[in-house]
Image (spheres, rainbow, N blue to C red):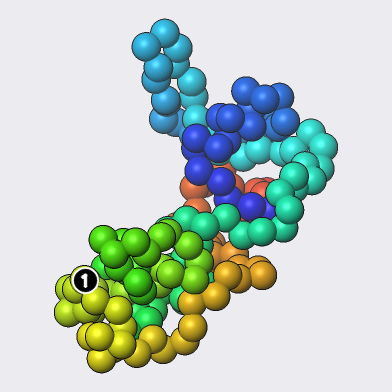
Amino acid sequence: MKVVDWRKALILWFQDKVEILEFHTVFARSPSETFRLPSVLRLKRYIRSTHNNKIRFCRENVYLRDDYSCQYCGNEFERKELTLDHIFPASKGGGKSWTNVVTACRKCNQKKGNRTPEQARMPLKKPALEPEWLPQKEISFCDQESPPVWLNYLFGHD
């Protein structure tokens, strides 16, 4: 089982890769169409990853790699309280890559400013490395939090 956002669900449906088993009560609208959003999908066949097993570099994956913790102060934060920081500043030619970007809280990111960690005297808690794998973001399900149509699929309710 995997939870995907509504955009990915619609794309999989448009590509005829899934069957929709249940729908939400909300709709997505385009200028010419209205679609009821899928809630439960079933793959028509297993989809093998076409990627070369490299982890995609993106904000969410950097947060996962760094365990939602600031790599300067070491404290854990909610996603909305985090930023990405270039170890070697972008303004000085530092690129967006696994080895040059880390998770930082707003306070530490502002304190470090347009300097390297050495210049700011703010050493990293761990080196910024390209991950070989990332854990899936944990999603907790309970009867109160889950959409009602998911219950039969998650807990075997009748």
Can residue 65 be spotted in the picture? yes
x 25%, y 85%: residue: 119
Residue 41, how many percent across, how many down?
66, 38
Horizontally, residue 20 falls left or right of residue 124, namely right
- Label count reads 1
Looking at the picture, does residue 29 appear above or below residue 121? above
Horizontally, residue 138 falls left or right of residue 82, namely right
Mark 1 neighbour density, 10 Å: few (under 14) some (14–19) many (20 or more): some
Q: Nearer the viewer, residue 80 or 106?
A: 106
Looking at the picture, does residue 102 appear above or below residue 6? below
x 49%, y 24%: residue: 36
Question: Residue at the top extreme?
Answer: 32
x 41%, y 68%: residue: 101
Residue 114, how many percent across, how many down?
21, 71
Q: Which residue is mark 1?
A: 114
Looking at the picture, does residue 98 appear above or below residue 67? above
Q: Quadrant of residue 81?
A: bottom left
Can residue 144 be spotted in the picture? no
Horizontally, residue 61 falls left or right of residue 133, namely left
Question: Residue at the right extreme?
Answer: 45
Helix, strand or loop for disc 1: loop
Looking at the picture, does residue 12 appear above or below residue 151? above
- Name which residue type carries label 1: Asn
Q: Nearer the viewer, residue 56 or 16?
A: 56
x 73%, y 53%: residue: 52
Q: Quadrant of residue 102?
A: bottom left
Residue 123, how many percent across, how many down?
34, 90
Q: Nearer the viewer, residue 94 or 80?
A: 94
Residue 70, how many percent across, how many down?
34, 79
